[in-house]
Image: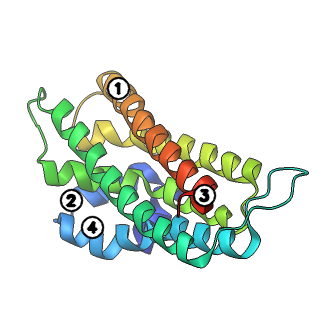
Amino acid sequence: MFNHVWGLLAHPGREFQQISQEKETISHLYTRNLLVLAAIPVVCSFIGTTQFGWMMGNEQTVKVSLFTAAYIAIIFYGMLLAAVAIVGRIIHLMARRYTQSPSLERCIIFAGYTATPMFLSGLVALYPLVWLCLLAGIIGLCYCAYLLYSGIPTFLNIDHSEGFIFSSSTLALGILILEALLAMTVLMWGYGTHFW
């Protein structure tokens, strides 16, 4: 797992070629990669919101109780894992028009590796300053977009101009999913003490 993580950050083109040659399955992706990577923002958010609390400038911090944070963390974790599968499904549906259309399994695997920077950006939630989490999220999203734009032509075996159009469409839909996930997360983490 960590070889691919480092490879995606350091040399994504070469790493995507290596990943495409492997005979990885969805169960292998989830058990060896995504279950650990998706836990990073969940565990960091749990620790940050229960130990330090949300810090929003000059206002006092807002802490979440352990029970509420545990409940929210479980839901957040499930949503992250489901989001990867949904984006993989979108890639699969959009890729059906190409002659070398990949299987749904390959598309979910590609989506899982493309989401790696977003999962890693969750490390900053250990100390949940709103502006710092926002900055890390933007950087993670930008690197996910870079991975998507550089990986799609290799993944689908299409030229770069066609890959740019495909990647742009996928990125737009992925951002919609991310916004929905963020909205639910903000509601749960920000107002969790009022609902539970």
Which label number is shown at residue 97? none
Crowd tier of the residue under label 3, counting other residues whose Cα lies within 10 Å: few below 14, some 14–19, many 20 or above: few
**Mark 2 vs mark 1: which is more N-terminal?**
2
Residue at image coords 11%, 47%: 103
Mark in front: 4 vs 2: 4
The alpha-carbon separation of the residues under discs 3 and 1 comes to 38 Å
Tag 4: residue type? Answer: Leu
Give left or right: position of 52 versus 119: right
Residue at image coords 73%, 51%: 130
Q: Is residue 41 visible?
A: yes
**Mark 4 vs mark 1: which is more N-terminal?**
4
**Mark 2 vs mark 3: which is more N-terminal?**
2
Q: Mark 2 points at which residue?
A: 21
The alpha-carbon separation of the residues under discs 4 and 2 comes to 14 Å
Crowd tier of the residue under label 2, counting other residues whose Cα lies within 10 Å: few below 14, some 14–19, many 20 or above: few
Mark in front: 2 vs 1: 1
Return the x and y of residue 131 as percentages of the image width and height: 76, 47
**Mark 3 vs mark 1: which is more N-terminal?**
1
Quarter residue 100 falls in:
top left
Circle 3 sits in a helix, a strand or a loop, which is it?
helix
Q: Name the residue under label 3.
A: 194
Circle 4 sits in a helix, a strand or a loop, which is it?
helix
Crowd tier of the residue under label 1, counting other residues whose Cα lies within 10 Å: few below 14, some 14–19, many 20 or above: some
Quarter residue 121 falls in:
bottom right
Return the x and y of residue 165 as percentages of the image width and height: 34, 22
Q: Name the residue under label 1.
A: 169
Tag 2: residue type? Answer: Gln
Return the x and y of residue 51 as percentages of the image width and height: 72, 76
The alpha-carbon separation of the residues under discs 2 and 3 comes to 49 Å
Tag 3: residue type? Answer: His
- Compared with 39, 85 (above or below) is above
Q: Mark 4 points at which residue?
A: 29
